[in-house]
Image (tube, rainbow, N blue to C red):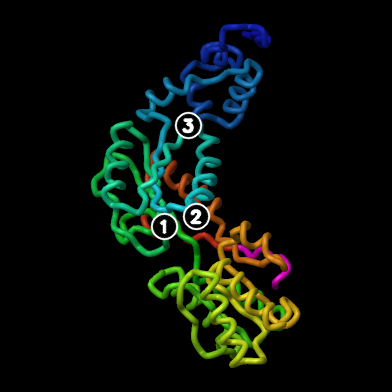
Amino acid sequence: MSLAPQSDSTKSRATLKQVAQLADVSIATASKALNNRIHVRASTRQRVLDAAAQLRFRPNEQARSLSMGQTGTVGLITGDLEGRFSLPILMGAEDAFGTGRISVFLCDARGDAIREQYHLDALLRRNVDGIIVVGALTNQRPPIARDLPVPVVYAYAPSEDPRDVSVVPNDVAAGANAVNYLLDQGRTHIAHISGEASYTAAQERALGVTAALAERGLNLIDDTTHFGNWSEHWGRTVATRLMERHPDLDGIVCGNDQISRGALDALQRTGWDVPSRVALLGFDNWEVLTTGSRPQLSSVDLNFERLGREAASLLFGMMNGTVEPGIRRIDSRIITRESA
C-alpha cells in the first residue's frame, strides 16, 4: 500500500500506522525500527526510516517515553560556581542528549552538601531518568547518595566508590603532553609553576611533567614543581624568582591560564621575550585570558565538552542497560597560539 506524502499545509500529523503502511510492515515492527530496537533487519529499518522521512513523521515523545518507563529528562548538579568547567561540560552533555531528545535540568549546589541533597530530592521528585554530578575540582568526592532509583554519572570530580561511573580529565597525560610539546620545540630548561598541592589535578599533572622529562634524561629546573595558588600573582612571583636563579630558563608549564598570564607579565617586565627566549604553556584554555594577552597564550585544553558528551553517553547506556563501573579519562589537546 502506498500513501502520498503530506503537504506542509496538512494539519493532521502522520501516524505510526501510516508509516507502517507505507513501509509495508506491522505497526510493531515500525515502532521497533524507529526506536532502534534489535531484531529488525537493516533493510527493513531503512525502509521504515525512509517512510517516516517521506511522511515527515514525528513521534509522540511523551507517549514513547511513557512506554519505555522514562520521562525524557535528566538532572545535572554542579558545584562549580564560576561555570568555567561546568558550562562546557553541560554544553557537551546537551549536545549528546539533544540527539536523543532529552531535556536537562541544571542545578547549582554552590559547593554546599545540604543544597546538593535538596537538588537531588527535587530532581527525584520530577522523576528524572538519570543524573550527572559535576564537581568543582578533580579531587575524589563521596557518592551523592546510595541506592538511588536512577543512574548517576560523576563528571570532572570522580566518586570515591569504585562501583560508580566517573569521567575525568586525563591530567597525568596532559602534563606529559605539555612538556613533550615544549621539548619538541627544543626547550630543555623547563620549570613547572602549579596551583595548590591539595588538588588532585595539580599532583597528577606534576607526575606527568616529571615523567616526560625523565624519559628524555632531564629534570625540572629547581628539581621541583612550584606549588602555590591558582593566581596571576603566584605566576609573577615564581617567574621573577626563576629568572633571577636560572638565566638559561627557556620554557614554563603553568598550572592554569591565570598563572601563565602572571608569568608572562613578569617576563615582559624583565625584558625576556616570549616566546623566543622563554616559551609559555598554560592549562584550561580559558579564552578570556588566552586571547586577551599579548602575545596570545598557548594552553592545554582539557576537552570539557567531550567530557560532557562522554558523561551523557554513559548515562544513556546506564538508562538502557549496564555500563562497567570505574573511571574514564578524557585526553587533552594543546591549543597553540603565540606564547609557545
Disc 2/disc 1 C-alpha distance (Å): 8 Å
Secondary structure beneath label 3: loop
- Residue 13 image offset from top left, x and y in percent: 56, 11
> Which dot, 1 or 3, sits closer to the camera?
1
Task: Decide which of 308, 15 is in the foreground and name it.
Answer: 308
Q: Are marks 2 and 1 in contact (CB under 8 Å)?
A: yes
Disc 1/disc 3 C-alpha distance (Å): 38 Å
Question: What label does residue 82 carry, if any?
Answer: none
Secondary structure beneath label 1: loop
- Residue 155 image offset from top left, x and y in percent: 43, 54
Extent of the magenta region: 333-340
Q: Main secondary structure of the magenta part?
A: loop
Q: Who comes first in sequence, dot 3 or dot 2? A: 3
> Does the magenta segment cover residue 338?
yes
In the rendered view, tell whether residue 116 sits above or below residue 62.
below
| Amino acid at pointer 1 | Ala
The N terminus sits in image quarter: top right
* Residue located at (48% from left, 45% from top): 313
Question: What label does residue 136 carry, if any?
Answer: 1
User: Could you tell me how many numbered marks the image carries?
Assistant: 3
Give the residue number, with chain letter if any, for mark 3: 37
Give the residue number, with chain letter if any, for mark 2: 85
Task: Decide which of 119, 265 is in the foreground and name it.
Answer: 265
The C terminus sits in image quarter: bottom right
Q: Residues within 10 Å of mark 1 (few under 14, many from 20)?
A: some
In the rendered view, tell whether residue 294 sits above or below residue 46.
below
Q: Who comes first in sequence, dot 2 or dot 1? A: 2
